[in-house]
Amino acid sequence: MNIFVGGLPFKVDEQELREIFEKYGEPTSVKLIIDKQSGRSKGFGFVEMDDEAGQQAIEALDGTELYGRKIGVRVSEEKKPDRRF
């Protein structure tokens, strides 16, 4: 399961995000999205883990606060192709 995590405080790094999700199962990958220009987090990322653990993590973490910010945790949607004409 690929999980989208949004609303992350900028000081959260991949290791801390991994530790948050490890309470529910072993993440197979954790990716924080970084702005190429500034080198700073964009405030969202993705965590991959098995379906059962992922569902538990979503239910437990969605809407919780992390450093004073409410985070959104949900199943990631497939990226739609860019349709510029």
Image (cartoon, grey):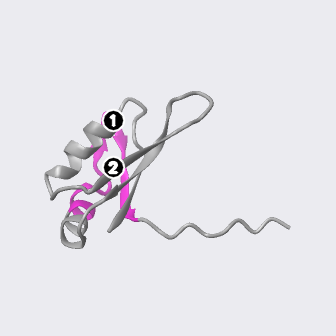
> Residue at (31%, 57%) from the top-left corner?
62
Dots 1, 2 in contact, CB < 8 A:
no
Q: Quadrant of the N terminus?
A: bottom left
Mark 1 or 2, closer to the camera: 2
Please provide percent x and percent y for residue 39.
53, 29
Please provide percent x and percent y for residue 19.
20, 43
Asked whether 20 or 50 is in front, the reply is: 50
Sequence-wise, which precedes: disc 1 or disc 2? 2
Which numbered circle lies on residue 30? 2
> Residue at (33%, 39%) from the top-left corner?
14
Quarter of the rendering containing residue 60: bottom left
| Segment colored magenta | 57-75
Q: Is residue 2 magenta?
A: no
Eyeballing the image, is 69 above or below 37? below
Which numbered circle lies on residue 4? none
Please provide percent x and percent y for residue 47.
33, 55
* Disc 2 secondary structure class: strand
Q: Is residue 44 left or right of residue 56?
A: right
Eyeballing the image, is 27 above or below 51? above
Quarter of the rendering containing residue 4: bottom left
Please provide percent x and percent y for residue 9.
40, 36
Q: Is residue 65 left or right of residue 37?
A: left
Q: As shown in the figure, which amino acid type bears the numbered disc 1?
A: Gly
Q: Is residue 58 magenta?
A: yes
Q: As shown in the figure, which amino acid type bears the numbered disc 2?
A: Val
Alpha carbon separation for disc pair 1 and 2 = 22 Å
* Disc 1 secondary structure class: loop
Q: Residues within 10 Å of mark 2 (few under 14, many from 20)?
A: many
Query: Which residue is labeled 1 in the image?
Result: 68
Q: Quadrant of the C terminus?
A: bottom right
Tag count in the figure? 2
